[in-house]
Amino acid sequence: MLYPQLGFSGSQLQQSGISKGSVQPFPYHMVSPSPWPILISFSLLFLTIGTVSWMQGYDSTTMRLGFTLTLWTMLQWFLDVENEGNLEGNHTKKVGNGIFTGFCLFVISEVFFFLAFFWAFFHLSLVPSIEIGGVWPPQGIIPLNALAIPLLNTVLLLSSGVSVTEFHHALINGDKLKGMYSLSATVLLASVFTALQYLEYVQSGFTIADSVYGSTFYSTTGLHGLHVLVGTIFLFFCLLKLVNYRLTLNRHIGVECGILYWHFVDIVWLLLFISIYYWGGM
């Protein structure tokens, strides 16, 4: 049997580890007991405690341990989900729809999460308090030039949004080579964005402790940068799945979630650039 959408045969499908006979007799997946939820909870607890301690001048060992455990647990959990779908055949159409619906709800929760930070920014900037001199930006703060690195990062992130859309179209049309190039370009652009964001932080003339401007700036842009990093890892794993023939026209729910997440990151950055970098720095 030929799978024209990615150009490989049924025997190659078997070699990739996907069993055509390993399907559920019912449309729902009865998930086996998993250690990952409790492990990710404790990992995030260590990461939070370690980060707060590090910001107070203590050793960063706990933060590094929490960060490492969080990444390792996420990787193991993602691999389990991957095996449940591709090797065990548990991800039926209903399961896939449930996963995508759950991810959409997660993105909606992220919208409200960022809304809180934008609310704080506009609350502080539209009516500056007397403690910061009654002006915005506060006295003594030299804001970053929005037309320098931020503008370049905007071009990079919007370009990555175009390339990831090209990848999606290539996947649907069965053009594996174009899909690999497009997704590789997306990951590369995202990596350059993260590097430039780090360079911007290094060159900045204020810190997170410098008034409410520094707090809102670094909190909002830093959390967005963290989302970019997570999205880059997400799309990189999609690239590995594409290279290893783990994606088909009927089995790419993870790709759709990754693309949705990336477009969400794009939109948040546009709002960040317009409000915090450009308008907020005037």
Image (cartoon, rainbow, N blue to C red):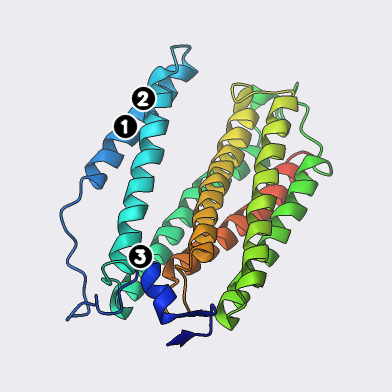
Instruction: Give the amino acid at mark 2.
Output: Ile
User: Contact (CB < 8 A) between labels 1 and 3?
Assistant: no
Could you classify mark 1 by the number of other residues whose Cα lies within 10 Å: few (under 14), some (14-19), or many (20 or more)?
some
Instruction: Give the amino acid at mark 3.
Output: Gly
* Residue 164: x %, y % from top left: 63, 65
Q: Which mark is residue 45?
A: 1
Dot 2 corresponds to which residue? 49
Q: Is residue 112 above or below residue 10?
A: above
Q: Is residue 60 above or below residue 158?
A: above
* Residue 52: x %, y % from top left: 42, 23
Could you classify mark 2 by the number of other residues whose Cα lies within 10 Å: few (under 14), some (14-19), or many (20 or more)?
few
Residue shown at the point (50%, 60%) measured from the top left = 238
Residue 61 can be seen in this image = yes
Q: Quadrant of residue 22?
A: bottom left
Secondary element under disc 2, as helix, strand or loop, is helix
Gap between marks 2 and 3 measured at Cα: 29 Å
Q: Which mark is residue 102?
A: 3
User: Contact (CB < 8 A) between labels 1 and 2?
Assistant: yes
Report the quarter where the N terminus lies.
Answer: bottom left
Q: Quadrant of residue 67?
A: top left
